[in-house]
Image: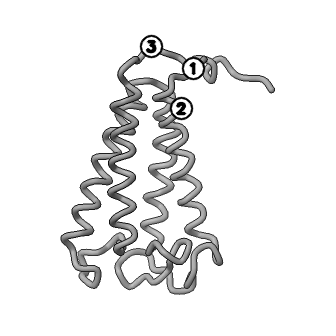
Amino acid sequence: MTSTRAELTRTRLQQASLAVGVVFLIVGILGFIPGITTQYNSMGAAGHESMAMLFGLFQVSVLHNIVHLIFGVAGIAMARTWDSARLFLIGGGIIYLILWVYGLIVSQESAANFVPLNTADDWLHFVLGVVMIALGVLLSRHPHRARA
């Protein structure tokens, strides 16, 4: 198996950004697949009226899936440099913590729940935020350490 020069010099921080980006991209794609997303026919463009559930657990809409796709592309693209990988992980983590707080404050039946979010989404956003920030902070302690 051959490795490109970028793969050989990519830091663990950049690898983490790439991995998180790939996961977001996959989740965004899975949100558009009937069966993996239950009640697929009830998926709305946005808003709490969308009853589509990714893995039967996480409420999704077209907008929600597109946000996952955008985060995925951003994570992959930002993995190219150490600085942008750190920004993606820490900045993205902060965005997810803000989304967690928003989900806790906004009623699930409110028009303000435009993403849409349910309780499972809220707590997943909390975990994502904490993990992304932790990766960004812990893996940025040694910026010049490339993978072995």
Instruction: Specify the color scheme.
Output: one colour
Disc sitting over residue 147 in the figure: 1
The structure residue drawn at horizontal position 35% and vertical position 45%, both measured from the top left corner, is 92
**Could you tell me residue 52's position as x and y percent?**
50, 80
At label 2, the amino acid type is: Gln
| Mark 3, residue position | 144
Label 1 residue SS = loop
Mark nearer the N terminus (2 vs 3) = 2
Instruction: Report if the CB atoms under discs 2 and 1 are less than 8 Å apart.
Output: yes
Apparent side of residue 123 relative to residue 59 in the rendered image (left or right):
left
User: Which residue is at the far top?
Assistant: 144
Q: Rate crowding at label 1 as few (under 14), some (14 to 19) or many (20 or more) other CA atoms within 10 Å.
A: few
Residue 129 lies left or right of residue 73; in this view the side is left
Residue 68 x %, y % = 47, 57
For mark 3, give the secondary structure: loop
**Distance in Å between CA atoms under marks 1 and 3:** 10 Å
In x, y percent, where is residue 114?
31, 73
Dot in front, 2 or 1: 1
- At 50% from the left and 48% from the top, the residue drawn is 72
Q: Amino acid at mark 1?
A: Arg
Q: Callout 2 environment at 10 Å: few (<14), some (14 to 19), or many (20+)?
A: many
Residue on which disc 2 sits:
15
